[in-house]
Image (tube, rainbow, N blue to C red):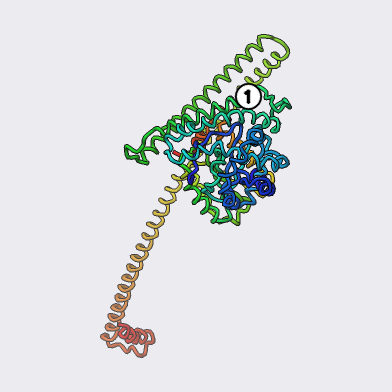
């Protein structure tokens, strides 16, 4: 592991060679102390470089036990190889970078080229993928795998070069245009994926049905079972279809009943409203009728009272005019005396 | 150099280089240990950094970086800020599938101080997948390590027919219209 190898290798490093602590760890602490050393380190340690290079590749990753020993030595070994590269890499822009980077690299290519080819050998044996225990023996599977990897990486670099070659600075780039373009492209990708998937499914289905048909033609135990299963399947699907039809019918009936219920509800509501209005009207009529009746009765009463007073007055006048001694007769007295009351009433 | 570029160097044979960027060094150590314990048939180099840019003194010793994983701790806004500052030092062509955001510490829901919204927006802005994980627990750490190893294989170009660019299109949500 990179950082752990760094901490364990920093102890032997100051004693043997003032080489930088293992290259991969970008820890800021050791960096300033080792910054001046790479320029001086490569010169004295060039001699042991080729022999220790094969062990450099697996050193950072595998068991820490072999790491401390080869760690200080291989650290300067990759230094001379990419050393010419950074001098030219910062200068060019990204466009020529992949094209010029290989230019200084081929000068050092012979050095790293034989190294990595032998590096996978111990890598595979140490990583435990290769079958042979030789340090040099590499089996064909890993070679093919490496070949595929390199092909894929080459394709990536090619597409990176293509993207860099496209010059976007001539025209103004609108973000909306790019976004719509990406959406279109992504939709295309989705459509292609989906159609491919569907075609695969259809293909698999035809393959399966063909295989089934061939199998059934053979007419042995398995095919009999298959035939029975298929017949059972057909029967089950038939019953399912029937049940679903019945369900559908029942649902329709249910819907009809609900509709009728709704219409009945509406009708009932209307009727109730009619009843309410009618009752209201009746009450009003009653009230008005009562009022009229009372008025009539009062009028009658008044009339009768007036008539009785008139009749009484007439009677009194008759009695008084007839010069009869009405004080002796109690009934006549009562009639004449009542006049006062009537007069008082009027 | 100050800016990390994906194709500036030649790739190392049969290996994948992973760069973990995040302010929490102990978590990075544990995650990288778990990653290196994964069964695999290619070499993995794990580089740890608290922030970018990487010190330029050792730049010629560094191999080509295949996958950058920015680790954001959901319990500290400081990690989000540091990651955002480090993003400026990564070349734009890296974001075509070679960058991944790893949000750690999602097990403790009541200690979140970084909003999910902010993290998801970051992932959308940079067109990179956002993985949520909990590195304290063994199981999820192993699962995260497996996912990262698989992503690393694709980004390093080991899988024929699948390139890192496919991460961008695979990330589209189905309800996006």
Picture coordinates of residue B70, whole percent (x, y) = 55, 46
Could you classify mark 1 by the number of other residues whose Cα lies within 10 Å: few (under 14), some (14-19), or many (20 or more)? Answer: few
Residue A286 versus residue A280: which sits nearer the camera? A280
Q: Quadrant of residue B62?
A: top right
As drawn, the residue found furthest toward the top would be: A218
Is A9 positioned to the left or the right of A89 in the image?
right
Asked if residue B171 is positioned above or below residue B111 in the image, the reply reads above
Which residue is drawn at the image coordinates 66% and 41% (left, top)? A71
Q: Residue at x 43, y 40 (%)?
A: A91
Instruction: Tell me the residue at 64%/41% (across/down).
Output: B145
Please, is residue B86 above or below residue B176 in the view?
Answer: below
Task: Say above or below: A268 vs B40.
Answer: below
Residue B46 on image: x %, y %: 61, 42
Q: Position of residue A334 (x, y in %)?
A: 37, 85
- Counting the numbered discs, the total is 1
Spot the residue most to the front.
A44
Query: Which quadrant is the C terminus of chain B positioned in?
Result: top left
Is residue A190 visible to us here? Answer: no
Q: For this view, does A314 lie left or right of residue A52? A: left
Whether residue A22 sits left or right of residue A202 in the image: it is right
**Disc 1 is attached to a residue of which chain?**
A
- Determine whether A10 is above or below A340 in the image: above
Residue A232 in sight from this viewpoint: yes
Q: Which residue is mark 1?
A: A143
Q: Indicate the position of residue B128 as horizontal and vertical percent values.
A: 51, 41
Q: Residue at x 68, y 40 (%)?
A: A70
Name the element at disc 1.
helix
Q: In front here: A107 or A302?
A: A107
In the foreground, A276 or B76: B76
């Amino acid at each position: 592991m990179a950082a752990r190898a760094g901490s364990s290798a920093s102890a032997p490093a100051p004693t043997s060679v003032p080489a930088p602590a293992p290259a991969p760890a970008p820890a800021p602490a050791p960096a300033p102390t080792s910054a001046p050393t790479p320029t001086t380190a490569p010169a004295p340690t060039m001699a042991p470089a080729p022999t220790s290079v094969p062990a450099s590749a697996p050193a950072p990753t595998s068991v820490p036990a072999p790491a401390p020993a080869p760690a200080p030595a291989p650290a300067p070994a990759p230094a001379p190889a990419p050393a010419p590269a950074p001098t030219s890499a910062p200068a060019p822009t990204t466009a020529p970078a992949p094209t010029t980077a290989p230019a200084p690299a081929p000068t050092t290519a012979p050095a790293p080229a034989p190294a990595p080819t032998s590096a996978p050998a111990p890598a595979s044996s140490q990583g435990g993928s290769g079958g042979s225990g030789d340090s040099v023996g590499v089996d064909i599977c890993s070679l093919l795998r490496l070949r595929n990897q390199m092909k894929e990486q080459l394709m990536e670099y090619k597409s990176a070069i293509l993207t860099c070659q496209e010059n976007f600075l001539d025209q103004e780039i609108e973000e909306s245009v790019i976004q719509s373009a990406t959406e279109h492209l992504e939709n295309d990708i989705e459509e292609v994926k989906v159609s491919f998937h569907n075609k695969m499914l259809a293909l698999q289905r035809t393959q399966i049905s063909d295989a089934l048909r061939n199998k059934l033609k053979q007419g042995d135990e398995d095919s009999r079972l298959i035939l029975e299963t298929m017949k059972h399947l057909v029967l089950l699907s038939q019953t399912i279809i029937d049940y679903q039809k019945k369900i559908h019918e029942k649902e329709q009936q249910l819907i009809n009943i609900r509709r009728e219920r709704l219409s009945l509800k509406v009708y009932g509501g209307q009727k109730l409203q009619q009843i309410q209005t009618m009752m209201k009207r009746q009450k009003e009529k009653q009230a008005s009728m009562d009022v009229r009746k009372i008025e009539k009765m009062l009028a009658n009463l008044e009339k009768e009272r007036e008539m009785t007073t008139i009749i009484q007055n007439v009677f009194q006048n008759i009695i008084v005019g007839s010069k009869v001694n009405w004080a002796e007769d109690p009934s006549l007295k009562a009639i004449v005396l009542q006049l006062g009351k009537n007069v008082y009433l009027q | 150099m100050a800016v990390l570029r994906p194709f500036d160097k030649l790739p190392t044979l049969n290996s994948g280089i992973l760069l973990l960027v995040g302010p929490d060094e102990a978590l990075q150590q544990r995650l990288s240990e778990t990653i290196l314990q994964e069964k695999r048939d290619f070499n993995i180099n794990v580089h740890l950094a608290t922030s970018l840019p990487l010190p330029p003194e050792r730049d010629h010793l560094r191999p080509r970086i295949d996958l950058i994983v920015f680790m954001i701790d959901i319990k500290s806004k400081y990690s989000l800020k540091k990651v955002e500052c480090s993003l400026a030092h990564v070349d734009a062509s890296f974001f075509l599938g070679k960058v991944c955001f790893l949000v750690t510490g999602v097990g403790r829901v009541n200690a979140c101080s970084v909003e999910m919204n902010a993290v998801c927006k970051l992932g959308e802005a940079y067109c990179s997948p956002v993985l949520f994980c909990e590195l304290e627990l063994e199981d999820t750490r192993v699962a995260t390590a497996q996912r990262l190893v698989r992503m690393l294989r694709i980004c390093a170009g080991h899988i024929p027919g699948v390139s890192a660019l496919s991460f961008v299109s695979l990330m589209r949500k189905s309800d996006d219209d």
